[in-house]
Image (cartoon, grey):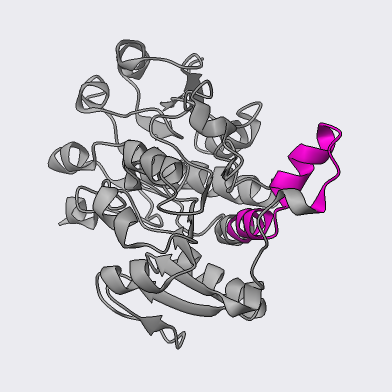
Amino acid sequence: MSATYRVLITDRAWPDCEVERKELALVDAEIIEAPPGADEQTLVKYATGVDAIATCWAPVTQAVIAAAPDCKTIARLGIGLDNIDVKYATSLKIPVTNVPDYCIPEVADHTLALMLASLRNVAFFHHQTKQGIYNLSAAPLPRRVSALTMGVFGFGLTGQAVVQRARAFGMHVIATNASGNDYGTGTTMVSFQELLQQSDVISIHAPLTEATHHQFDKHAFSQMKSTALIINTSRGGLIDFAALKAAIKNETIAGAALDVFDPEPPDLADPFFQDERVIATPHAAFISKESLDELRQQAARQVADVLVGRKTTNVVNPAVFE
């Protein structure tokens, strides 16, 4: 006997769908999995006739959504929404959900790990010693971390968590966002230009939108300190990659520590990734056992809620209910 509902999972960053399967079985929903790396045409095929779509990174385009005329909800297995055509979903009265708070400690910790690995030459010396080189003087003389200014671009929950951690290291912290609201943190809020000019470390924690796409471009890098480090654990498209490569090559800035790229995965054959001033991790900031459990359970429950007509959490387009 077939299930009452069918839910497409477009892609995942974990070994199986057992957590999702268990949650959705409670409302008599079965899971349909698209093959790894499915393109739009394949996703359209798998989306045909499903009652809900859950997606990690795969693009849920207008064509994919249109293939599922009975689709009741689209769930993002994550925070950012740039891979979902939310505007089109809203036009069809389809609620879109995300899980905005599942990995805040992980991303904040990863940000500080990237910062320390760069500022304290940990990554550089690790690479050197693995090649049999034991030479303290091979790296530039570092600054004391507590003497530096951390600039946070975007000041949501993750940005605020980064501020707490940076302060624990004695850093002076400034931030910028569209509203200028410090959310009671006592953080000095500055303009984007002031952030660029004053920061020794800039950490990016903003969503990718039309307004923020390539926010860090050639002009932005030209205003940064030549000794500055840029960290991105948010979305690759916030940085103009060609401009970043030029800034590193020309020593406009001192280094980059990146967990996200545009496109993903990046071309690791690019000489940029062999530069000793660049640290790269494979979009790993969000991962821990605890964060994945929270993410998968909450996203699956959101889908289940909508399928059976219950009110759910974190609907990003509440206008669909008006």
Residue at x 51%, y 14% (from the top left corner) = 1
Q: Where is residue 181 in the image (x, y as percent from the top left)?
A: 32, 80
- Which quadrant: the C terminus? bottom left
Q: How many labels does the image show?
A: 0
Depicted 9 relative to depicted 123: above or below = above
Residue 126 on the magenta segment: yes
- Answer above or below: position of 181 versus 218: below
Camera-side residue of 316 and 276: 276
Q: Which residue lies furthest to the front in this view?
A: 137
Secondary structure mostly seen in magenta is helix
> Which quadrant would residue 17 be assigned to in this image?
top right
Image location of residue 158, percent across then percent down: 49, 64
Residue 268 vertical placement versus 204 (above, below):
above
Q: Is residue 149 at all visible to an observer of this figure?
A: yes
| Residue at the (64%, 60%) spot, across then down | 119
Q: Which residues make up the magenta segment?
A: 110-136
Residue 31 part of the magenta-drawn span:
no
**Along the viewing direction, whichever of 24 and 281 lies nearer the viewer:** 281
Residue 243 position in % (x across, y down): 32, 42
Nearest the eye: 155 or 252: 252
Q: In which quarter of the image is residue 60?
A: top left
Please name the residue shown 63% across and 51% down the image: 291
309 displayed left or right of 152 = left
Place of residue 95 in the rendered image (x, y in percent of width and height, measured from the top left): 28, 46
What residue is rendered at 35% in x and 46% in y?
A: 239
